[in-house]
Image: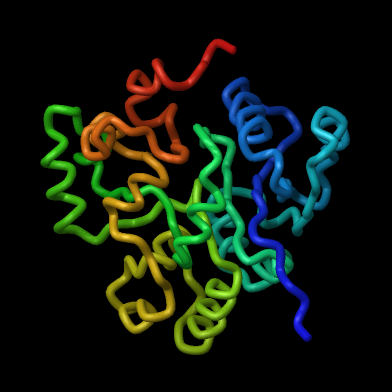
Amino acid sequence: MAEKKSRVAVVIPVYQANMTDAEQMSLRQCMAVLGNYPVIVVKPAGLDLSALQQQYPALRVQSFANSYFAGVDAYNRLMVSIDFYKAFDAYQYILIYQLDAFVFRDELEEWCAKGYDYVGAPSLHMPEFDTISAEAAQDFADALSSHRVVLNGGLSLRKIAAFLRYLKIYNLFYPSWKGNEDMLFCQEATRLKPMKIFMRLPEWREALRFSFEKSPAASYELTNHQLPFACHAWERYDPAFWIPFIPVNQ
């Protein structure tokens, strides 16, 4: 009889012991809102995070080779490796929570229950749609409806079994993926169209309820002024929008 898997864990990539004020705030918020779930820090094998574990005794740690944390390309290699997902095979889902994210409320179980394989903030790799104003929200909606949308991986819910299956099939038929890891799982490349059947994704309107990233003011209009479960890269895209919602001075 197969062992029953735990529902979901929160996985936080940490590259170095010294964090910025914004990263510390992000972590505090994560522990305050999602601290009842297993929270696992993913870190380089050579990084000592004992001080952080003293501050947050509930934190668990999962180490990977230092080489995976040498830069963005190295991190992308980690996130498309089967070994990464095997390390969390005790869980049905993991929530990747990079420390440029901010969670507003606990809807994690509800999102797991929807049964998607992958959920993240909908965005376009087109700079003209990075900071659309509230008044131009329909332009953002039209762009999301007519272009290939990427669900950003920095704050994302992932079904472990689906990712293991997807990567095993991908590795049989395609060369090593060299781009951003979230683009692989959203079928950004034309040549990956046959892979689409192996990854169940939400439509962009539902994904906005999960997270905002680019154009948060327009996103807020499109959700009828309802904040999502969380947001990603709030300091990068229109940070002024977030001033009423994120306590940057605490």
Q: Residue, x 38% and y 48% (percent of image)?
A: 121
Q: Residue at x 55, y 80 (%)?
A: 165
- Residue at image position (80%, 32%) is 56
Q: Please tell me how many numbered marks the rendered image carries.
A: 0
Q: Which residue is at the front of the view, 105 or 88?
A: 105
> Residue 108: horizontal and vertical position, in percent?
55, 49
Q: Residue 150's spot in the image, x, y percent?
A: 34, 56
Which image quadrant: the C terminus?
top right
Residue ranking furthest to the top: 249
- Colour setting: rainbow
Whole-percent x, y for residue 90 in the image: 73, 67
Q: Nearer the viewer, residue 218 or 188?
A: 218
Quarter of the image for residue 35 reads top right
Q: Quadrant of the N terminus?
A: bottom right
Displayed quadrant of residue 28: top right
Residue 197, image quadrant? bottom left
Residue 190 to residue 216: above or below: below
- Residue 139 lies, with reference to residue 184, above or below; the image says above
Q: Residue at x 29, y 50 (%)?
A: 125
Q: At which x and y percent is residue 222?
A: 22, 39
Q: Is residue 235 left or right of residue 88?
A: left
